[in-house]
Amino acid sequence: MYAVIETGGKQYKVEEGSNFIVEQNTDVRIGQNILIDKVLLLVNDNKESIIGRPIVKGATVTTILVSKKKGSKLIIFKKKPKKGYKKLQGHRQHLIELKVLSINLNK
């Protein structure tokens, strides 16, 4: 069984027992359970699919926070020619790794 979920404006294909990395959007602790209810697609073991319009009613994905990390460094460089203006900035996105515990469908 797998599902396509939406979190942080991005879509992820997840299966039970798999890990995936998303952008951190709230203050959470390691070991905390996170319930995701924006399930866009659900496919069970019999290859029957349930497509949401836009989300599947009653479907949830239960995850647990495994670790926190930072993404790779992005360099932002701005320059205006002939004006002497240069600005250099860096950014690292805070990421969290989630493990899928279960995919549920309550009809």
Image (cartoon, rainbow, N blue to C red):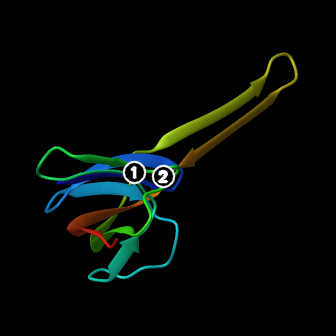
How far apart in space, not on screen, are marks 1 and 2 (Cα)? 5 Å
Quarter of the figure with the N terminus: bottom left
Answer whether labels 1 and 2 touch (C-beta < 8 Å): yes
Instruction: Report the amino acid beneath label 1.
Output: Gly
Q: Earlier in the sequence, mark 1 or mark 2?
A: 1
* 57 relative position to 105: left or right: right
Classify mark 2: helix, strand or loop. Answer: loop
Q: Disc 2 marks which residue?
A: 92
Q: How many numbered callouts?
A: 2
Q: Position of residue 50 (x, y in %)?
A: 33, 50
> Can you say whether 82 is above or below 73 in the image?
above
At a point 44% along the width and 64% down the height, the residue shown is 57
* Residue at the spot 50% in from the left edge and 40% down from the top edge: 74
Query: In the image as oriented, which residue stretches furthest toward the front?
Result: 107
Pick the front one: 63 or 69: 63
Q: Amino acid at mark 2?
A: Arg
Above or below, 68 relative to 6: below
Q: Residue at x 11, y 48 (%)?
A: 46
Nearer to me, 73 or 104: 104
Secondary structure beneath label 1 = loop
Q: Given the current orientation, which residue lies at the most extreme right position?
A: 83
User: What residue is shown with label 1?
Assistant: 71
Splitting the image into 4 quarters, where does residue 82 fall? top right
Q: Is residue 7 above or below residue 85?
A: below
In the figure, is residue 24 to the left or right of 105? right
Near mark 2 (Cα within 10 A), the count class, few <14, some 14-19 or many ≥20, is few
Q: Residue at x 51, y 56 (%)?
A: 8
| Picture quadrant where residue 37 is located | bottom left
